[in-house]
């Protein structure tokens, strides 16, 4: 060091340093921090670990770790496929068929019940009734990873406008075109939709189950609309039925308590 020149940097030598926790580690850290605020450049030598840290190393490390966390989060979000149904869920549809359908496709009613779920694969029992009163049942298997969405009957849950799902049958991605709030079976639901030359479909966003469809098939068209389900309950004044009844019970108890208190006060005053 040359005398007479202003000191602009320093080197702090310590046996150990952060992230090891201890008294000397904290003292050195606070001392260095205050000197850096005054404009001093610095480095410090950790004798125990035999490594040198400059004042930019921790900032660089924090930035790198932050970028990695963001990338991992984005990758996980993009790669996540959500199944919105659970075992025991069911939904029924009123069906209308126009044109000249093939045998067994002139339906007027259908019901789907979820049987089993394993990751992104699940099975359902689909029961149908034809216009002549014949019932039939078939087990359908869905697999969102493979793109087996069975004519878009159920798609991944919580897809929004611009999101897409893969349909292996037509070998292409289908993009959600929009969403809106609708009253479906007595409850306000967020409904998404998409259109292709083959069909128009609307889904309940949180479950991924279709609630309305128009399928354009060769020589005939199928229209289906949800008519009953156990996946959500009808609402009363915008509240779920269970919540509404709980609120009513609480209000009734509160009114009874107030009336009882008033009667008690009046009785005491008469004495």
Image (cartoon, rainbow, N blue to C red):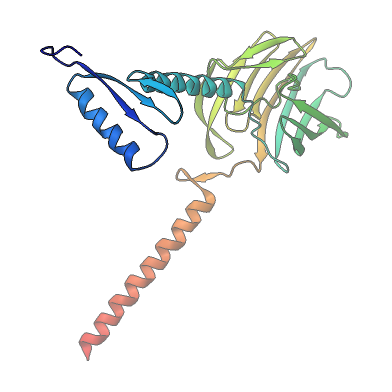
Q: Residue at x 34, y 37 (%)?
A: 25
Q: Residue at x 22, y 88 (%)?
A: 270
Q: Nearer the viewer, residue 43 or 173?
A: 43
Residue 172, position in %: x, y? 70, 9
Q: Please tell me whether residue 73 is drawn above or below residue 84 in the rendered image.
A: above
Residue 15, position in %: x, y? 38, 33
How many numbered discs, if any?
Answer: 0
Residue 175, position in %: x, y? 60, 13
Q: Which image quarter is the N terminus in?
A: top left
Q: Quadrant of residue 28?
A: top left
- Residue 196 can be seen in this image: yes
Q: Quadrant of residue 204?
A: top right
- Check the image and name the residue furthest to the left: 4
Q: Is residue 44 left or right of residue 99?
A: left
- Residue 130 can be seen in this image: no
- Check the image and name the residue furthest to the bottom: 271
Residue 107, position in %: x, y? 80, 27
Q: Nearer the viewer, residue 122 or 228?
A: 122
Q: Residue at x 63, y 29 (%)?
A: 82
Q: Nearer the viewer, residue 91 or 36?
A: 36
Q: Please tell me whether residue 36 is drawn above or below residue 242 in the rendered image.
A: above
Q: Please tell me whether residue 3 is drawn above or below residue 181 in the rendered image.
A: above
Q: Is residue 136 left or right of residue 89?
A: right
Q: Residue at x 19, y 15 (%)?
A: 8
Q: Is residue 29 left or right of residue 181?
A: left
Q: Is residue 164 left or right of residue 119?
A: left
Q: Please tell me whether residue 182 is drawn above or below residue 4 in the rendered image.
A: below
Q: Which image quarter is the C terminus in?
A: bottom left
């Amino acid at each position: 060091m040359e005398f007479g020149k202003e000191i602009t940097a320093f080197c702090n030598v310590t046996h150990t340093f952060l992230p090891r926790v201890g008294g000397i580690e904290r003292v050195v850290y606070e001392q260095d921090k205050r000197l850096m605020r005054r404009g001093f450049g610095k480095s410090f030598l950790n004798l125990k670990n035999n490594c040198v840290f400059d004042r930019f190393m921790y900032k660089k490390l924090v930035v790198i770790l932050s970028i990695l966390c963001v990338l991992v989060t984005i990758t996980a979000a993009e790669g996540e496929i959500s199944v919105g149904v659970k075992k025991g869920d069911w939904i029924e549809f009123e069906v209308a068929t126009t044109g000249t359908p093939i045998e067994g496709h002139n339906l007027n009613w259908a019901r789907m019940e979820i049987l089993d779920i394993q990751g992104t694969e699940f099975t359902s029992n689909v029961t149908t009734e034809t216009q002549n009163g014949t019932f039939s049942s078939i087990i359908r298997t869905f697999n969102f990873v493979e793109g087996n969405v069975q004519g878009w009957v159920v798609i991944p849950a919580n897809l929004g406008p611009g999101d897409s799902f893969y349909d292996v049958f037509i070998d292409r991605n289908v993009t959600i075109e929009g969403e809106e709030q609708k009253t479906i079976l007595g409850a306000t639901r967020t409904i998404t939709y998409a259109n292709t030359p083959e069909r128009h479909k609307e889904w309940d966003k949180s479950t991924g189950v279709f609630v309305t469809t128009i399928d354009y098939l060769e020589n005939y068209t199928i229209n289906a609309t949800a008519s009953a389900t156990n996946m959500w309950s009808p609402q009363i004044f915008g509240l779920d039925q269970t919540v509404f009844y709980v609120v009513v019970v609480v209000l009734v108890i509160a009114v009874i308590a107030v009336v009882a208190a008033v009667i008690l006060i009046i009785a005491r005053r008469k004495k």
